[in-house]
Image (tube, rainbow, N blue to C red):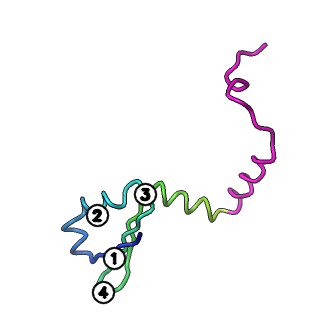
């Protein structure tokens, strides 16, 4: 969900606005003089968006899916 607030409202209600954005996919667009200026977005969500646009990262995910996977037992078992 996207919410639009002006800079004055952001200053006044920052705690509530940041709480609504934190931990999810909500975005708050901040306007200045009636025009979109900035966006407030959860950092984890931003990282997910950036990773989704990174072609090298996407390629490494596809490659990882094709490679052998290991079970927890294999990963944490003591060497023979």
Q: Earlier in the sequence, mark 1 or mark 2?
A: 1
How busy is the neighbourhood of tag 1: few (under 14 within 10 Å), some, or many (20 plus)?
Answer: some
How busy is the neighbourhood of tag 3: few (under 14 within 10 Å), some, or many (20 plus)?
Answer: some
Looking at the rendering, which quadrant does residue 34 occupy? bottom left
CA gap, disc 4 and disc 1: 10 Å
CA gap, disc 1 and disc 2: 10 Å
**Residue drawn 73% across the image and 25% down it:** 74
Kindly identify which residue carries mark 3. 24
Kindly identify which residue carries mark 2. 17
Q: Earlier in the sequence, mark 3 or mark 1?
A: 1
> Foreground: 1 or 76?
1
As helix, strand or loop, the secondary structure at mark 1 comes to: strand
Tell me: residue 30, above or below residue 56. below
Where is residue 46? Give x, y as percent: 49, 61
Kindly identify which residue carries mark 4. 34
Residue 4's label in the rendered image is 1
CA gap, disc 2 and disc 4: 18 Å
Residue 67: say if magenta: yes
Tell me: residue 38, above or below residue 24. below
Residue span colored magenta: 55-80
Q: Are marks 4 and 3 in contact (CB under 8 Å)?
A: no
> Foreground: 56 or 9?
9
Where is residue 76? Give x, y as percent: 67, 22
């Amino acid at each position: 969900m996207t919410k639009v607030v002006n800079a004055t409202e952001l200053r006044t209600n920052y705690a509530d606005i940041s709480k609504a954005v934190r931990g999810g996919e909500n975005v708050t667009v901040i306007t200045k003089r009636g025009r979109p200026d900035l966006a407030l977005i959860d950092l984890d969500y931003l990282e997910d968006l950036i990773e989704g646009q990174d072609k090298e990262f996407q390629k490494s995910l596809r490659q990882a899916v094709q490679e052998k996977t290991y079970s927890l037992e294999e990963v944490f078992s003591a060497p023979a």
